[in-house]
Image (cartoon, helix red, strand yellow):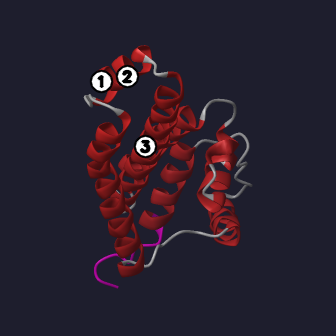
C-alpha cells in the first residue's frame, strides 16, 4: 500500500522497484487496473493509456532517429533492413524520416489531447496529506492502525467500503 501511495503522489514509478521504465509502467498499469476494478473508478484510465501511448511514440521516434543517423554514417544495410522490419519504412534516410513525420503528427495530436483532458477535468488526485488523513480516519473506524507497509490495496478498499456502508444514512435519514 505504501508503494501505491508513493507512486500516486509522486507520479514516479521508480518506487515500484527495479526494472526498465517500460516494465515499471506495465506493472503500474496492472496495479491501477486492479485498483480501479476494486473501486469502480475508471476516470484516470484514459489519461494513463494516453500517457503510455505518448511515451511509446516518443521512444519509437527517438530510436528511429538514432537508427537513421547510424544508417547514414555507416551506409548500413543491416540497419535499413531492421527499420523496414520494425517500422515498415523503406528507402534512404530522408524518405524514411519523411514517412516518420506521420508518427510525429500522431504524437503531437496525443500530446494536445492529454493537455486538453488535463485542463478540462481537474484531477481528483490525492496529496500525501490526503492519504494520511484517510488512513487515520479508517484506522479510527477499525479500532487499530492501518499499516501501509504491510496491508494491501485490496484491504484498504475493503475497509473504505465498510466505512462508507457504516456511514451511509439509512432510510433516507
Residue at 35% over, 80% down:
120
Q: Decide: is 39 above or below 89.
A: below
Q: Earlier in the sequence, mark 2 or mark 3?
A: 3
Q: Is residue 73 magenta?
A: no
- Say if mark 2 contacts mark 3, CB within 8 Å: no
Residue at 42% over, 14% down:
78
Camera-nearest label, 1 or 3? 1
Camera-nearest label, 2 or 3? 2
- Nearer to the camera, 144 or 39: 39
Quadrant housing residue 61: top left
Which secondary structure, mark 2? Answer: helix
Quadrant location of the C terminus in the rendered image: bottom left
- What range is drawn magenta here? 166-173
- Looking at the image, residue 167 sits to the left or right of residue 91; the answer is right
- CA–CA distance between discs 2 and 3? 15 Å
- Say if mark 2 contacts mark 1, CB within 8 Å: yes
Residue at 40% over, 72% down:
115
Quadrant housing residue 118: bottom left
- CA–CA distance between discs 2 and 1? 6 Å
Which of the labelled discs sits on residue 80, or is there none? 2
- Residue matched to label 1: 84
Amino acid at each position: 500500500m505504501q508503494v501505491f501511495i508513493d507512486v500516486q503522489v509522486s507520479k514516479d514509478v521508480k518506487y515500484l522497484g527495479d526494472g526498465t521504465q517500460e516494465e515499471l509502467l506495465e506493472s503500474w498499469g496492472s496495479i491501477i487496473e486492479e485498483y480501479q476494478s476494486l473501486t469502480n473508478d475508471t476516470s484516470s484510465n484514459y489519461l494513463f493509456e494516453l500517457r503510455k501511448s505518448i511515451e511509446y511514440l516518443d521512444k519509437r521516434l527517438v530510436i528511429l532517429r538514432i537508427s537513421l543517423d547510424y544508417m547514414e554514417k555507416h551506409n548500413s544495410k543491416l540497419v535499413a533492413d531492421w527499420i523496414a522490419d520494425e517500422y515498415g519504412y523503406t528507402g534512404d534516410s530522408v524518405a524514411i524520416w519523411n514517412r516518420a513525420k506521420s508518427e510525429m503528427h500522431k504524437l503531437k495530436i496525443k500530446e494536445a489531447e492529454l493537455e486538453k483532458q488535463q485542463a478540462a477535468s481537474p484531477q481528483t488526485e490525492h496529496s500525501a496529506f490526503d492519504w494520511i488523513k484517510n488512513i487515520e480516519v479508517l484506522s479510527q473506524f477499525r479500532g487499530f492502525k492501518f499499516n501501509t507497509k504491510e496491508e494491501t490495496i485490496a484491504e484498504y478498499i475493503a475497509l473504505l467500503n465498510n466505512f462508507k456502508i457504516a456511514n451511509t444514512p439509512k432510510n433516507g435519514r
